[in-house]
């Protein structure tokens, strides 16, 4: 529960001029957010005040804690984290430079998979709404690495249980990689999700991970040590003999006073010989200082990550120095078909990469031709067609996607945009109402709906929708501009 070990405190976030406080009241944990009149006047932003009751936290607390709250039956992450290394409250990763309060971040089962145990399936139509608590056990339990332990426990340790050390290398490594592999893009196979993975499975049967060709050594991400390890001379020489548990005990960590000698002994298991043990820089017993330095990751604030590239002479470049490339390769040389490649490149295309979009279209069309496609393929082809102005083909792809899942919010939202552009306001309203009804956190769909309602002269309905959206995302700049000026998406509709 959020109140367990809660450290009360707060901070002023300078870019947004919002002061966050975390505190206990009446035996419950709360987060408040405020932008006072003076800050509003100086920043040109609206005044802001509100509270969220924090219900659960995820994270061991070793590096930090992320807090969850519930609103309208749905679960969201708080926009701030507690960072244990520096003992401070600050913005959650990627929000440090945000000039407004971040949009509510939905918590889905894939997010929870790596931080909790016995994650529950979301209800149909909303990825972050559950029939009860979203998980049944806090933290990482035995089942994450050993599968269902019930028979093992019932027979007092003699019943069957998954022993990772006895699995084939790919299945053994998958147990760690289910949470310690990130990549630039993760593409789930048709009908699969990370939340379905169980110890003993091959992760490659569920998801394919891609990295940019110039980021094969991790790209500075905090959870990408395996990508870096694959590039190391140690891994290339040892092959499948070297795995995460070669150096790390998943059940315990050495005491701070013993860390240097503990990990040095791991290095000397392979780097044998009297000279290496006694004469190789005897003044520095910590091998990692020279060969596995700590660096600042690009995706987590107030933290450091150990570079697992294990170079003889590591580069002095920080992990934050990263290039951009539109060439994707799979992590670990896992085979990837046209479907996976097309979906991976389409994710780059969504961020404006035109070359990636052309590659995505080519691969996805081939995948659709060979296998008929699935909801992800149809959705992405529809999106690419829509961006290219080919509305007829886009509609066909979206129709095929909705035939597989009539409640897919992304498809309905994209199709509603096409309807609105074609002047089919009634059809657009119907689709957007279904999206917002199923998932009130869909801000773009909600704003689109409010604008169309305003345009068809149902201003009261438009204001009602905007009021509901503001309760979820009270500092959304597009919402604020629409309410105060009537301008949305470059068009105007007076709400008065």
Image (cartoon, rainbow, N blue to C red):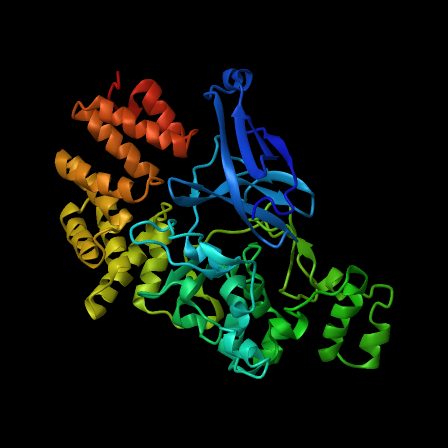
Q: Is residue 490 visible?
A: no
Q: Nearer the viewer, residue 321 or 136?
A: 136
Q: Position of residue 438 (x, y in %)?
A: 29, 44
Left or right: 212 as drawn, with respect to 294: left
| Residue 195 in which image quadrant | bottom left
Q: Nearer the viewer, residue 278 or 165?
A: 165
Q: Nearer the viewer, residue 392 or 199?
A: 199
Q: Position of residue 12 (x, y in %)?
A: 60, 29
Left or right: 140 as drawn, with respect to 379: right
Q: Residue at 58%, 80% (x, y): give it.
A: 165
Q: Residue at 50%, 71% (x, y): give it.
A: 174
The answer to whether 64 is drawn above or below residue 450 in the figure is: below
Left or right: 473 as drawn, with respect to 116: left
| Residue 17 in which image quadrant | top right
Q: Position of residue 381 (x, y in %)?
A: 24, 55
Q: Residue at 49%, 76% (x, y): give it.
A: 171
Quadrant of the rendering where the C terminus is positioned: top left
Q: Nearer the viewer, residue 190 or 326?
A: 190
| Residue 428 in which image quadrant | top left
């Amino acid at each position: 529960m959020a109140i367990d070990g809660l450290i009360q405190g707060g901070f002023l976030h300078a870019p947004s001029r919002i002061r966050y406080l975390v505190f206990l009241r009446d035996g419950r944990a709360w987060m408040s957010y405020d932008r006072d009149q003076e800050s509003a006047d100086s920043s040109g932003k609206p005044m802001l005040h509100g509270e969220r009751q924090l219900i659960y936290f995820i994270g061991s607390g070793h590096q930090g804690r992320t807090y969850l709250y519930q609103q309208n039956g749905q679960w969201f992450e708080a926009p701030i984290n507690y960072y244990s290394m520096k003992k401070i409250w600050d913005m959650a990763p990627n929000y440090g430079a945000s000039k407004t309060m971040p949009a509510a971040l939905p918590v889905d089962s894939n997010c929870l998979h790596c931080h909790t145990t016995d994650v529950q399936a979301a209800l149909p139509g909303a990825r972050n709404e559950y029939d009860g608590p979203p998980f049944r056990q806090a933290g990482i339990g035995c089942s994450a690495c050993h599968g269902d332990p019930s028979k093992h426990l019932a027979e007092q340790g003699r019943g069957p249980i998954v022993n990772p050390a006895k699995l084939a290398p790919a299945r053994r490594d998958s147990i760690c990689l289910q949470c310690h592999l990130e990549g630039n893009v993760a593409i789930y196979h048709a009908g699969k999700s990370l939340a379905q993975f169980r110890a003993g499975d091959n992760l490659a049967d569920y998801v394919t991970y891609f990295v940019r060709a110039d980021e094969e050594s991790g790209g500075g991400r905090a959870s990408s040590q395996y990508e870096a390890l694959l590039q190391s001379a140690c891994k290339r020489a040892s092959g499948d003999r070297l795995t995460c548990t070669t150096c790390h005990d998943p059940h315990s960590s050495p005491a701070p006073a013993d860390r240097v000698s503990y990990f040095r002994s791991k290095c000397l298991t392979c780097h044998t010989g009297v000279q290496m043990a006694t004469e190789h820089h005897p003044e520095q017993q910590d091998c990692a200082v020279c060969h596995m330095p700590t660096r600042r990751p690009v995706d987590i604030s107030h933290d450091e990550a150990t570079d697992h590239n294990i170079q003889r002479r590591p580069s002095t470049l920080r992990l934050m120095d990263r290039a951009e490339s539109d060439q994707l390769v799979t992590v670990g040389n896992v085979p990837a078909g046209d479907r996976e490649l097309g979906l991976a490149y389409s994710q780059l295309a969504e961020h404006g990469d035109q070359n990636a979009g052309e590659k995505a279209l080519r691969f996805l069309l081939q995948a659709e031709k060979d296998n008929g496609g699935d909801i992800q393929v149809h959705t992405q082809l529809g999106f690419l067609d829509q961006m290219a102005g080919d509305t007829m083909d886009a509609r066909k792809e979206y129709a095929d996607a909705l035939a597989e899942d009539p409640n897919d919010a992304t498809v309905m939202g994209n199709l509603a945009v096409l309807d609105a552009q074609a002047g089919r306001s009634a059809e657009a309203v119907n689709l957007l109402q279904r999206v917002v009804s199923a998932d009130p956190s869909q801000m773009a769909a909600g704003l689109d709906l409010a604008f169309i309602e305003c345009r068809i002269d149902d201003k009261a309905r438009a204001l009602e929708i905007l009021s509901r959206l503001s309760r979820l995302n009270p500092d959304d700049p597009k919402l604020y501009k629409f309410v105060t000026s009537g301008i949305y998406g470059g068009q105007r509709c007076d709400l008065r």
